[in-house]
Amino acid sequence: MCATCGCDSNASSSIQHIGEHNHPHDHAHEHDHSHSHGKTIVAVEKDILHENNLLAQRNRGYFDAKNILALNLVSSPGSGKTSLLERTLTDMKGEFPFYVIEGDQQTTRDADRIHATGTKVAQINTGKGCHLDAHMILHALQGMKPVENAVLFIENVGNLVCPAMFDLGEKERVVIISVTEGDDKPIKYPDMFHTSTLCIINKVDLLPYVPFSLDKVKEYARQVNPALEFIELSCTSGEGLSGWYQWLKAKVPVTETV
Amino acid sequence: MHELSIVMSILDIAEKESAKNNAVQIDEIELEIGELSGIDMPAFDFAWQQAVKSTKLEGAARIVTHIPGEGLCMDCEAVFPMHQLYKPCPVCSHHFITILKGKELRVKSLVIN
């Protein structure tokens, strides 16, 4: 059993810290049984996501204590999460200590791209899993050891459905949609837009070529989440990126001097 | 297919609770699943059939209480049945809505042997 979080050995995901030597994280298995007879009703009354939510709060406490801004980036595959991170990490280099946790089913391709920007990155491969959970983040952090006052980007598995249910302990959830997707995505996949605080509309340089209405996408998204903020940008042309950088800077917690 | 993760979490809770009570077998499990919890029941059933094999939940009766969604309009304070996240308040047509019921995902009880 894992000494830190008590996890069992059923984890099918793996974590690799890119640019470092890798050590496997093994869990032993414990089983205890004794026997008795007769039927008993046990009132369990437990949230199914209880374990995940406890670990998420634990991560959140860690981030708060170290004054780390943790952002959970969610979207469908191909909306440009990794490109946005590459661009951001390059343009804002030196402004904050940045860290990235990459979530994909397979390969270290995304982590390799982030590593190339000179940023410390861990790749989580979820195997068959369709989302990151708080437990995976906890273990990725153990190897990463981010410094205080840092910004941590967690790039979730490209999936507009499943990651919505799993709190990772992030400060804010940022949903990214690109103009090559339909503008009705927010009502087709409402959970993700409901749980996010910022919506980045990416690839706006392609707007002249696709039937995508900025007004419509915002209208649909506000039906699900009236408080949602929007930033329109293009990682290719650079348009709108300054708005995203300003948003980031405003979110970084100010260190309190005693 | 986050339903598989959900089923695995249920298995985990059931195994821990039954071990606490020294049970060898679980006869019945009662769940509460809200309408707005994001669970697709066919996917859930499929994941369930595969995941409970060779566990204490194999052969257990599964009782699911479905909890209908209920919203509270923050503008006009109307309380109404809520089936989708994007539908406006039926009284004032505004979208500032708090979910009162329907997000539940709970293991209520077990009958163990």
Image (spheres, coloured by chain):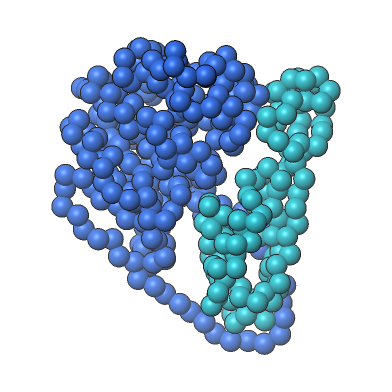
- Looking at the picture, does residue B55 appear above or below residue B11? below
Q: Position of residue A65 (x, y in %)?
A: 37, 36
Q: Position of residue B86 (x, y in %)?
A: 68, 29
Counting every numbered tag in the picture gives 0
Q: Position of residue A91 (x, y in %)?
A: 25, 19
Q: Which hue is chain A drawn in?
A: blue
Residue A217 in the figure: left or right of residue A28:
right
Quarter of the image for residue B55 reads bottom right
Residue A244 in the figure: left or right of residue A221:
left
Quarter of the image for residue A239 reads top left
Residue in the foreground of this view, choosing between A79 and A206:
A206
Residue at figure coordinates x 53%, y 62% from the top left: B8
Residue A227 in the figure: left or right of residue A19:
right
- Looking at the picture, does residue B62 appear above or below residue A120? below
Residue in the foreground of this view, choosing between A251 and A101:
A101
Give the position of the N terminus of chain A as an image quadrant. bottom left
Q: Position of residue A201 (x, y in %)?
A: 46, 21
Q: Is residue A59 visible?
A: no
Residue A179 in the figure: left or right of residue B64:
left
Residue in the foreground of this view, choosing between A252 and B104:
B104
Residue at figure coordinates x 52%, y 19% from the top left: A212
Residue at figure coordinates x 54%, y 42% from the top left: A161
Chain shown cyan: that is: B
Give the position of the C terminus of chain A as an image quadrant. top left
Residue at figure coordinates x 31%, y 14% from the top left: A237
- Looking at the picture, does residue A63 appear above or below residue B59? above
Q: Is residue B2 visible?
A: yes
